[in-house]
Amino acid sequence: MNNLPRRHAIRSLAGGGLLLPGLLTEMLRGEGNGSTRHDASVPVSPHFPARAKRVIFMFMTGGVSHVDTFDPKPYLQEHHDQPASKPRNRFYKGSDWKFRPHGQCGTEVSDLFPCIGSMMDDICLIRSMQNINGDHFGATIGIHTGSATFNRPSIGSWVSYGLGTTNNNLPAFMVISPGLPYAGGQVWGSDFLPSVHEGTRIIPGPEPIANMQRRSANAQLQKTELDLLQFFNRQHFRGREKDGQLASRIKSFETAAGMQLAAPDAFDLSRESDATHKLYGLKRGDTGGFGWQCLVARRLAERGVRFIELIDGDSNVDRNWDSHATMGIYNKLARNVDRPIAGMLRDLKARGMLDDTLVVFTTEFGRQPWVPNPGVEGRNHHSRTYCSWLAGGGIRGGMVYGQSDEVGNDVAEKKVTVHDFQATILHQLGIRHEDLTYRHAGRDFRLTDVHGEVVQDILG
């Protein structure tokens, strides 16, 4: 039965009162509008002309302190270890690092990030972010999925679902994560979206993806084997076209086979120049560190991957930005990411890729501007306000958007929620966040739920 008679049959049933309105909508949505699309390798046109073709999304696990990195607070310095006016029984804590203006824009950044600071003319810094949860798990999935309590697809999965990839041999959504962040694989999960849109995790090391090298004696023998397997898969698929899990599984096998062709080249940094390695702060032959992640991200972006996430740190407090005990660990953490991030921005810009690559730097929340006792070295969680930044992809560089109050406790002006942040990222990819939906359990879901406004003032 072709589509036209099927649509007539559905509408006839509806006209006779034999279908509930919700069921009618769900059945019709499966007809040619992509809502049940199980193939991320097919590029899809955006809702309107996009400024960005791809996203490199950097997530700093643990909650980076805004008042020690991108949001200078002279008041805290002046009142360090003095009693806070609110809340009671707390004491203000100044930063251990000085802030200095950078670039022609003069945006102040702490001495933790001198290299990123040198790129502030290309960066839009948001000092008024607010998350929807104050614990690591809820805040981490909040910034990634728009929900702090329920399983939802990650932003990378939504982008994969909405746009697909432009390289049939690589997934649309790839995640470079040495360890598991808070919330684990839910950070890149596809949840109710077809599983083909789930992020493919890359683990830095000699073999970033398991079984990346073919096992067959030669390429021609493997091609013959795979062609035969594909033939049997397609035969089995006939008559089961509406089985989303089966479609996704078949496509995942095909993508895996394609990755054996494309991935070894993508992860082979031997042909990158010494100057490029130096730019990223990467020693030739190293396969770890954030410099490796950033250079591989640029190579994946060149090869058509839509959404590349780089995760720094994991759920171990000794390896992330969760500085309850001491802020001193920031010296080591910042050195690990500062030069590679700035190097990636410079590299993208030199190659003409920054114009259509949206680079995002974020974390789950900031840190409190006060401590329980004078002399305490660490800071606790703080989701009421914190910092994130964006560069490239049609974003205005050299600007600061929003402000926190004089101590960095709350948003003073121009609040940006996680849903606003997500809506803006989708907008730069040519996606209306209200219209990127998927019908599940009888209702339409979207990344931003019923919230979110594009932050128009930061668009170039």
Image (cartoon, grey):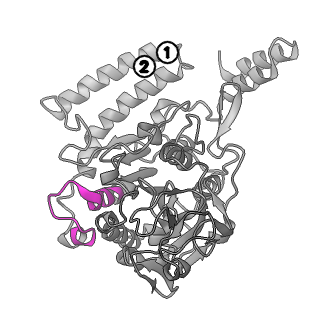
Q: Position of residue 253 (x, y in %)?
A: 36, 28
Label 1, residues with CA under 10 Å away: few <14, some 14-19, many ≥20: few
> x%, y% of residue 135?
51, 47
- Residue 41 appears in the picture as rendered: no
Identify the element where label 1 is drawn: loop
Task: Identify the disc placed on residue 234.
Answer: 2
Which residue is nearer to you in this view: 273 or 238? 273
- State the residue in front, 111 or 240: 111
Q: How far is disc 1 from disc 2 in space, using C-alphas?
A: 6 Å
| Amino acid at circle 2 | Arg
Amino acid type shown at disc 1: Arg
Q: Is residue 411 above or below residue 100?
A: above
In the rendered structure, the answer to whether residue 180 lies left or right of residue 443 reads left
The residue beneath circle 1 is 238
Q: Secondary structure at mark 2?
A: helix
* Snapshot quadrant of residue 48: bottom right
Q: Is residue 278 magenta?
A: yes
Q: Is residue 37 magenta?
A: no
Picture quadrant of residue 20: top right
Outermost residue on the left side: it is 217
Dot 2: within a 10 Å radius of its alpha carbon, few (fewer than 14), some, or many (20 or more) residues? few
> Which one is in front, 395 or 167?
395
User: Which residues are the magenta region?
Assistant: 277-297
Instruction: Identify the residue at horizontal 52%, vertical 75% (top origin).
Output: 82
